[in-house]
Amino acid sequence: IYIDMDTMLGPLMKGLAVQMNLYQQISIMQRTLLSRPNLEKVVLMTDMDLAIKNETQKEALFERLRKKISIGQQGRGLNLFQITYEDSDPGQAKRVVQAVLQIFVEGNIGANRKDMDTTSRFLDDQIREYERQLTEAEDRSANFKRKNMGFLPGEGNFYSELEGKRAKAAATESLLREAMSLNQVLRNQVEATPQFLRVSGGMGFAGQGGGSGAGPGPGTDTQLRIMEMEAAIDSMLTRFTEKHPDVVIAQKRLDSLQKSFEKELKAERNFMASDDSEGAGHDSKTIKVPNPVYEQLKVQLVQAEASLAALKSRLENEKNQVEKWLQLANLVPQVEAEMARLNRDYGLIKNNYDQLRKRKESAKMARELETKAQKVQFRIIGPPKM
């Protein structure tokens, strides 16, 4: 038997398909060819079992076959083998050699395919297991990202959020300083502007719905604004609670207007009292009327104070947010470390999975090569004859 293992497919498929060590495989087959299972096959294939009547005869037959069958290599390092057997019956001798030859050839071919089937099943099981591990790792990573979205590296992370809140608080603080400055300017202007003006004629407060000594009547600008603000608050309370920010701001404006009105009343009384004490020092036809400039300044001051209060409240809330995020800063390194660990585990599983898929493809190609091509050719140089 000449075994040709130097086919063209070998070099062509090197690195693409799994290459079996054919020399080692044939050498092992040569040494194990006369094992008891193979000898039992020879006995059945040659009908020698028909003459066996007991176990003693069976064992004697196996021992005789083991001694008389010879498998030798012709020359050192050559792929030429010789199978010999001696028997008094030439036909039986031929049948035994033919059976051993068939077992030798089929054993070498079948061993490869059986090993490939076992390997393929193992790779399939491993690939399924790693697919399961990959799915679990991906789920863990996705859940972790959802729970710690603001603390992960990249766009929209913790540091950018913190800087955004700091910038927002700084902008509000700048607006607050401007509002405080405007408020102080208006306050100074109100203090420097007289509340009442002396005019000649009889169109004082009476002309606006009140008497000279009864204070500003309901027709003054302050009273009208008080009435408008009260109506606005009543309307808002039908939709919001008393703690709603819009209701709170409106109530602060109403309180400020009422205080201004009380000051106007007090100032008018004082003015009238001083006017009475002066007596004949003034023309009896000269009366006092509210200063419209003063009224406008007071309205602007009330609006500025309400805006100032809103900005203070907003700044306090934004500073609280910045402080809250600063307290969470200790969590960022822990989240980043955990994310790195999850990515590392996923990378290892993914790498093993990819390697298994590559080996599966290599094994598949090797199986195709084994079943559809002849990597090893067994040539019977000298067939058995009687």
Image (spheres, rainbow, N blue to C red):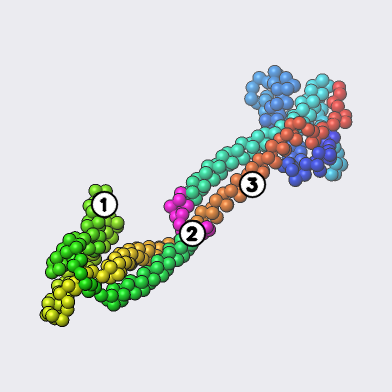
Q: Is residue 235 above or below residue 310?
A: above
Q: Using the image as rendered, state which of residue 289 and residue 338 is in the foreground.
A: 289
- Element type at mark 2: loop
Q: State the CA–CA distance, disc 2 to disc 3.
A: 34 Å
Return the x and y of residue 299 as percentages of the image width and height: 29, 65
Q: Using the image as rendered, state which of residue 111 and residue 198 is in the foreground.
A: 198
Q: Earlier in the sequence, mark 1 or mark 3?
A: 1
Residue type pointed to by label 2: Asn
Q: Residue at x 71, y 24 (%)?
A: 43
Q: What is the span of residues highlighted in magenta in the rendered image?
A: 143-156
Q: Residue at x 63, y 46 (%)?
A: 354
- Element type at mark 1: helix
Q: Earlier in the sequence, mark 2 or mark 3?
A: 2
Residue at image mark 2: 157
Q: Residue at x 80, y 35 (%)?
A: 376
Q: Residue at x 32, y 72 (%)?
A: 186
Quadrant containing the C terminus is top right
Residue at image mark 3: 355
Quadrant containing the N terminus is top right
Q: State the CA–CA distance, disc 1 to disc 2.
A: 39 Å
Label placed on residue 236: 1
